Image: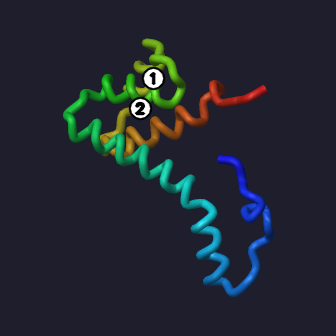
Amino acid sequence: MTPSPEDLEPITGAEESIVAKLKSRFADAYQGDQRFRDQLSVWVAQGLSDNEILQRMFMATLTRPPAAAEIQAVMAHKLTDRGMWLTSVQWALLQKIDFVFY
């Protein structure tokens, strides 16, 4: 997302106004996060297996399938709360070295 000139202007005013302006500026980023959560909910509701969801998460995030060792490592850290586990996996994928730009 490219910032608009308005996004680069300092935010001033009453505290409530500042919070409202910040929410407005970051609404697109929040919507992106919400869309992922919605997609994850769809995959879970469809009854997809953990492996199938992991395959889709890797493809959606890294544009490549996971290696067998990656699936094994993720499965070794599986939590009893499936939603929390899958959300944690997504954050881990976003922090992978694959996202480092040189």
At 75% from the left and 74% from the top, the residue drawn is 11
> Which disc, if any, is residue 77?
2
- Label 1 element class: helix
Considering only vertical position in the picture, is 50 above or below 87? above
Residue 86 quadrant = top left
Between 15 and 74, which is closer to the camera in this rendering?
15
The three-letter amino acid code for the residue at tag 2 is: His
- Mark 1 in CB contact with mark 2 (< 8 angstroms): yes
x, y (%) of residue 76?
Answer: 39, 26
At 35% from the left and 47% from the top, the residue drawn is 38
Residue 45 quadrant = top left
At 45% from the left and 17% from the top, the residue drawn is 65
Between 1 and 70, which is closer to the camera in this rendering?
1
Q: Residues within 10 Å of mark 2 (few under 14, many from 20)?
A: few
x, y (%) of residue 77?
Answer: 41, 32
Between 12 and 52, which is closer to the camera in this rendering?
12
Most distant residue in the front direction: 5
Distance of label 1 from label 2 (alpha carbons) = 7 Å
Considering only vertical position in the picture, is 25 above or below 16? above
Most distant residue in the top direction: 68
The three-letter amino acid code for the residue at tag 1 is: Ala
Quadrant occupied by the C terminus: top right
- Label 2 element class: loop
Q: Which residue is mark 1?
A: 73
> Which disc, if any, is residue 17?
none
x, y (%) of residue 56?
Answer: 39, 27
At 39% from the left and 23% from the top, the residue drawn is 55
Most distant residue in the bottom direction: 14
